[in-house]
Amino acid sequence: MIGGERGLANLPLIAFCLLLAAFLIAPLASLGVQAFTAPAGQDALANFAKYFQTPGLMRSLVNTAWLAVVVAVLVLPMAFVVAFTLERTLVPLKGSLAVIASAPLLIPSLLPALALVYLFGRQGLLRPFLGGGDIYGAQGVVIADVIATFPHALVILRTALSAADGRLYEQAEILGASPWRTFWRVTLPGARHGLVSAAVVVFALVIADVGAPKVVGGDFDVIALDIYKQVLGQQNFQMGSVAALLLLLPSALAMVVERVAAHRQAALISSRSTAYRPRPSARRDAVFGGLSAIIAFCILAVFAVCQFAALVKLWPYDLTPSLAQYDLDRVDGGGWSALTDSVWLALAAASLGTALAFIGAYIAERTPARGWLRQAYAALALLPAATPGLALGLAYVLCFNDPANPLHGLYGGFGILVAITVVHLFTVAHLTSTSALRALDSEFESAGEVLGRGRWSVFLPVITAMSTPTLIEIFVYLFVSAMTTVSAVVFVYPPAFKLASVAVLNMDDAGDIAPAAAMGMLIVYVNVVVRGLGVLLRTAAVRRERLAYARA
Amino acid sequence: MVSPLFREVGTQGVIEAAAFTVRGLTKRFGEAVAVDNVDLTAPVGQFTCLVGPSGCGKTTLLRLLMGLEQPSAGVIELGGVDVTRAAPAKRGMGMVFQSYALFPNMRVSANVAFGMPRALASQEKAKRTAALLETVGLPGLERRYPGQLSGGQQQRVAIARALAVEPRILLLDEPLAALDPQIREQLRLELKALQRRLGVTTVMVTHDQAEALAVADLIVVMRAGRIEQIGSPQSVYDAPANPFVASFLGAANLLGGEVASPGEVSLHGGQTLPVDAKAFTLGQTVVVTVRPEAVRVIGPEQPGLTGKVTGQVFGGAASRVEVQLDGPGAKTLMVDVAAGNPCPGPGEAVRLGLPIPSLRLFPKLAEGTA
Amino acid sequence: MRRPLFAVAMTLLAALGGCSKPAQRLVVYTAAEADQLPAYEASFKTAHPDINIVWVRDSTGVVTAKLLAEKKAEQADVVFALAATSMMQLDAEGLLAPYKPAGEERLDKRFKDGRDVPHWTGQSLWSAAVCVNTLEAKKHNLPLPTRWEDLTQPIYRGMISMPNPASSGTGLLAVGAWLQIMGEDKGWAYMDRLHQNIASYAHSGSKPCKDAARGEIPIGISIDFRAAQAKAEGLPIEIVIPKEGLGWDLEATGLVAGSHQPEAAKAFIDWAMSPAAMRIYAQNFALVGDPSVPTTASKLPADLKDRLAPIDLAWTSKNRERIIDEWSRRYSVKSEPKA
């Protein structure tokens, strides 16, 4: 009976592992099979050999690496400045700065690229400042990706800087260290794992992004674009799979580095640490406040210019205000129904994803299951973050339209869109759930059991109720990400179910960039509303919880 | 024995406090043996304390009793009935966790009523909850959240919640560990009083020997998964079964030496200590234990051990003096000097008397064995 | 690659189809312009009220990729209005079943696949075209080009955009046509010279013309009907038909091997080649399969159909991979910032 109970206890986690295996491992395996399926008479690596012999493709590889490094090098100082301003200075309007700086999380990655066209294209507002230069090419992609990845780096660096141990700063002050010396000797080393983590996340985001290279890349080819071109331009699934696998490797490596760095960063803060409180310093605040204001202004400019372009009749020849660009049914991409379809998808993916990630993390963290099984689940749950969206999308196509797949029925329907969106975004939802669940008293389930109601009796009334703010956070993250993601769904969306984010891509593709900007801004507005509601609900939930925790 | 709890609380059921017996209980986690072939009987209505250093298996033993862990071998009987494989809820036990595991988002009333039969009318639940809170000394706090209570109040809510399932045995896992030292001492007395009043068989786990000595009717000293000694606080303190128990329960000096004659042990460093060593063979290596409060500072004319004071800590009722015994490789001896007696200062040469009845001899064994 | 102008909520159409009484359900994959579908459906419905069409519409590349991906379990019954070069690709994979539509003998022979019982049949023809932004041309003092060769003049340096053949069917069509019109060596030499003037290679066939309309680039090599459409919208566009001849492709229709509704599918294909359907195509295309139906697309240059180069679509389709590899080797390397 002991063995039986043990086995029974493993069942839920086995079920979750199987779920991820069916919707993640199996598709990736199909991708591998496709990449290694060579024409008859050639060895298995023939596709790879061919890839590396193609000069254009080889160059994409170099371009991709160069792009990722350059963007990371540019984003880190910028994100660090804003993170420092928010966490370590007494600059006024920090709340607004935080909102503006994280705003790019709410926008499709193509929008900054479109803004660049409007600002620096041949008819761009700021064209004269370019001095004859051109925005199309590597420089355009770099700028667009810097804006798109900025908030991701910011979140990580804010966490790293907010968790500083105030005792170290007091010590530095007692020892008479100058602010600069303190910065170099205490602040930077204290945030070093955060910096590594942020750099790697930016790296992974950049190599997976297809939007910016497509819109402002000009002839600057990257691997993600190669996958897109191979699959949709040339219907060459083998080469597409090879490129996808090439993207998967550095991405997976980045994921491993990121996890290690994140753990180390967390370990720097001990329970004896005291919170750091910034002292007044006009010079520091002026420098960081000023730099942050410039960055915030640039981000606002992206929104402003896209909104402006979407509200004029015909850029650049007729700038009279007009809602003509919002007549989205006039252009390719799916029209207004694409927006409602996207909202439905985002709602479905956010609901299902929140529930699955939370329950999965709960089972792995707080029910008695074998150690190896927990490790397997943890590894599976991290894998999506290591899988670029395009690779996952191609893998889904290859896997699910195979009639031999028992889940073949999902192909071409709404279900597969929900599935790929949830899987694509699963890691963050899982990690957020896990840390929230770990923060809860480990004896709640035992208490439920001892009180005669069983382990699961506390799941809803205690565990879930206590995790409400986290659940809202995860839901909002999944929703806004589902609204903006292009790469995961661009190969998978069924023709009867167009998506707003894909529509932005397709409209730009067709040259309809004003409607693309209009659609992009519609996504932004939906996300702003959902994010706003999320913040309100979360604040209410936190207040309720704080009330419960408040000492009399 | 009928527990007065349920008369007090006013429930219809009359539940008997029960004794439990454990035989050959063993729990392995992979290679590690957390509980190693333990035999134990906790008497009805008594307060039993499992005490030992951290990692000695006492908490695992408690969780085995509760049914939160499954034993690798052995039998657990409750009131003569085998409950080894019974679900936790079916064992008639209540448990208070170290963290209390109160549900922070529920009011005190909901916490206490959580384990009551769900079929019970809410009015009846409220009545019982009020009675339980009265019992633990927290009347009228139903509407509070756990976070609004002090640590001591939380602990008592946790006890009330555990009692709500009308347990025949109450298990307490380090219930005082989370509290400030000042209130800990007061609360252990209250805990003891409550247990007396309720008459419920109670098993408490603690790593704090002073706490165990203060509240227990029966002390079970554990080390490395095994029971070292069982007995009343007085007997365990006065007659420790081995040097480990002696040094773990209260302070003890451990002096190594060899039996020089049936009446003498030759200590390391060369001095000779008069003891009753008739049970030992000549030349046998032994350990002599003596409590610091048993050692006396005596005049230079009397026979005793000589040494030099190396340190002194003022301690109110008694000051503790550290004496380095004379002789190469000799030990340092802790000596408690009661307030009012002359206390030798650092550097002073002293002579110490160790009364023979206060000395206990143990054969020297390899470290780690009982 | 061809992009449609107007999109229609497909879900709505599917729902409309689903509302009527029990009828046959015909799944049609198409790259036709979304805004043209209602007219097609209405015309077909008058002939076959008992058959409900479920349109699955997307760009040429997506539809082709989808059909190839679904090889093991085809969902479609008919492929409608897909580029002939894509049809050849599908045919080479064995995805198309032979069927000779009623009235096939009336069609121009350029619209046939050459077999007695064809695997696909063309219905309308679209071609390359050059879009010139008149305002930008005036600003930069650019003369209106009249020949492909004109585009290699130094005055057009950095002024031209064309679709990348690796991602766009229109790009492949243009490149294939140059290679066939000029011969391979001269064709590549021409592109070497043209390459000097190209500002960027776009990922779709529509984009160069749309970009030209916005002044993002003065000159865009694009698709005829996209150019006509831009002009119809009043955008500052002049359509240039280079004298050497135009590359072209067909919108073609064929029966999917393993169709679940072969009879309904055949009825649909018969309709697609009927005079009624041809008259609808003629509203948008310079040339339709039935020579007796003249074009009514007013914004297209009248002489466009006479400028079509005598090219072999099958050659382009067959040499597709080689052309793209060679093209990428020569031109996608330039992508380093030119400034």
Image (cartoon, grey):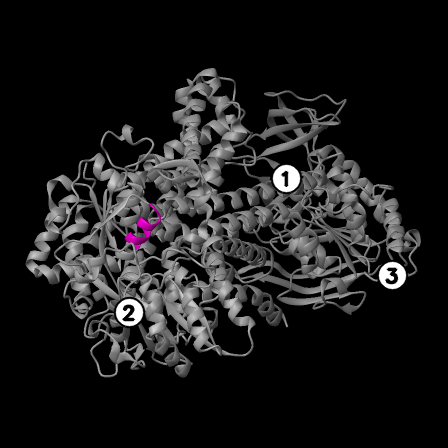
Residue position for label 3: B16
Q: Chain of mark 1?
A: A
Residue A226: x, y in percent? 28, 55
Q: Amino acid at mark 3?
A: Glu
Callout 1: helix, strand or loop? helix
Q: Residue at x 14, y 66 (%)?
A: C310
As helix, strand or loop, the secondary structure at mark 2 comes to loop
Asked if B365 appears above or below C141 in the picture, the reply is below
Residues drawn in magenta: C226-234
Which residue lies most toward the left here? C185
- Identify which residue, A86 or C323, lies in the foreground: C323
* Marking on residue C293: 2
| Residue at point 54%, 79% (across, down) | C22
Q: Is residue A71 above or below residue B242?
A: above
2 and 3 marks on the same chain: no
Chain ID, mark 3: B
Q: Are marks 2 and 3 in contact (CB under 8 Å)?
A: no
Look at mark 1 in the image and give the residue it sits on. Answer: A539
